[in-house]
């Protein structure tokens, strides 16, 4: 799809084309994309749902028999269908397969928010254009500005060539994070300890750590990882927010998904979990905070206001969970302190996940 940033988004393009659509993938991602298509009166264009060869099996999804890509081509190849990828992955073999399909068919990876209801459409862009442009102007190097521009274009168009232009090597972040002084590392959304291990090993100035993870199975693995690392590490089983308290989460949806964040969806089997703030931990000499808290980044920043004001830590903040994150996160941080240099990096992944702001 050829489009200027202000003239057309993916959904408008599909509305005009009205060509058959084949969905690649099943599950939550496909459900979200079908919901958008249904809302726009485009779900009638879906002709097939296909999966990678090892995931086809004998099953149905949303009224469609799940078939393979080759079967989809045999059945609908003459109709020149458009492929919409409905899952996320950073696995090289999966991304290579997506690239192969893209070389044969017109393919898009629609950007639908992980959390929230704001779809990144042309009208959303126009309504927030001033804020988006202000972030671009504030970025501190050409690589960040190029990454940001391509990321916005991707979110509008679903064209993965923009993501490919934005990619950087995962280890390139250490040229930024090396500016973190000696002190405490706060890992918000520590999962099973992968980032805890990564940063403690590569940033020897980090003398202690606090790791927060809400999902109970991941938390057990996190504790085991912390014990193996043998450093001064405190693990906390909790959500992170702007105020302390308790909140209900699903006990069966992984990563401690906040039950109340899923609009118009009643989740069953919920449990109560503590909500903490960074400020409530009363930490000393905080030098680095990583925020990856499943759509609650802005709230978590607010809950770290005093810590940020006092210590001005280096911060890595995920900006892909909500459509407004591309500008709201920067606005929130600069409201607290306006003396940060700001960078953006994206590592190889579809859709536009693994995209972060760095505040140095």
Image (cartoon, helix red, strand yellow):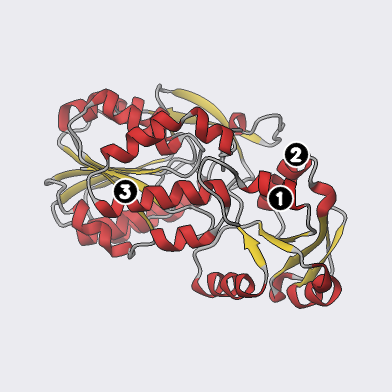
Q: Which mark is residue 14?
A: 1
The reply to whether the C-beta atoms of the residues labelled 2 and 1 are less than 8 Å apart is yes
Q: Which mark is residue 133?
A: none
Q: Position of residue 120 (x, y in %)?
A: 56, 39
Q: Nearer the viewer, residue 75 or 170?
A: 75
Answer with left or right where residue 100 lies relative to residue 287. right
User: Residue at the spot x=67%, y=70% of the render?
Assistant: 105
User: Is 184 left, or right, of 171 in this rendering?
Assistant: left
Please state if 257 lies on the left or on the right of 268 as rendered.
left
Name which residue lies at 51% across and 38% down: 322
- Lower sequence index among marks 3 and 1: 1
Residue, disc 2: 40
Q: Which residue is mark 3?
A: 145
Image position, residue 150 (x, y; %): 43, 52
Q: Quadrant of residue 192?
A: bottom left
* Tags 3 and 1 touching, CB below 8 Å: no
Between the residue at mark 3 and the residue at mark 1, the CA separation in whole angstroms equals 29 Å
Front label number (2 vs 1) = 1
């Amino acid at each position: 799809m050829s489009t200027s940033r202000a003239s057309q988004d993916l959904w408008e393009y599909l509305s005009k084309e009205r060509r058959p659509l084949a969905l690649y993938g099943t599950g939550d991602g496909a459900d979200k994309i079908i919901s958008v298509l249904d809302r726009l009166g485009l779900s009638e264009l879906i002709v097939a749902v296909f999966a990678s060869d090892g995931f086809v099996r004998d099953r149905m999804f949303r009224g469609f028999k799940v078939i393979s890509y080759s079967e989809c081509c045999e059945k609908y190849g003459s109709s020149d269908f458009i492929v919409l990828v409905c899952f996320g992955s950073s696995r090289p073999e999966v991304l290579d397969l997506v690239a192969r399909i893209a070389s044969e068919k017109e393919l898009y990876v629609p950007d639908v928010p992980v959390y929230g209801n704001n779809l990144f459409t042309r009208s959303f862009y126009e309504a927030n254009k001033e804020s988006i442009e202000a972030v671009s102007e504030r970025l501190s190097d050409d690589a960040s500005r190029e990454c940001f521009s391509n990321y916005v274009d991707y979110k509008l168009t679903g064209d993965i060539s923009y993501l490919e232009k934005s990619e950087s090597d995962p280890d390139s972040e250490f040229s930024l994070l090396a500016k973190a002084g000696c002190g405490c590392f706060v890992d918000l959304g520590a999962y099973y300890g992968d980032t805890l291990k990564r940063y403690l090993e590569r940033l020897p100035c980090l003398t202690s750590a606090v790791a927060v993870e809400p999902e109970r199975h991941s938390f057990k693995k996190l504790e085991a990882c912390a014990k193996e690392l043998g450093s001064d590490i405190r693990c906390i089983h909790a959500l992170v927010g702007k105020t302390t308290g308790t909140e209900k989460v699903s006990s069966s949806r992984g990563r401690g998904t906040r039950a109340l964040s899923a609009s118009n969806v009643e989740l069953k089997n919920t449990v109560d979990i503590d909500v903490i703030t960074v400020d409530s931990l009363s930490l000393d000499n905080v030098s680095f905070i990583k925020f990856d808290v499943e759509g609650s980044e802005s709230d978590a920043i607010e809950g770290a206001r005093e810590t940020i004001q006092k210590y001005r830590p280096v911060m890595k903040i995920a900006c892909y969970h909500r459509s407004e994150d591309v500008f709201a996160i920067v606005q929130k941080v600069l409201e607290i302190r306006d003396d940060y240099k700001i960078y953006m990096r994206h590592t190889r992944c579809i859709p536009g996940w693994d995209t972060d702001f760095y505040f140095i």
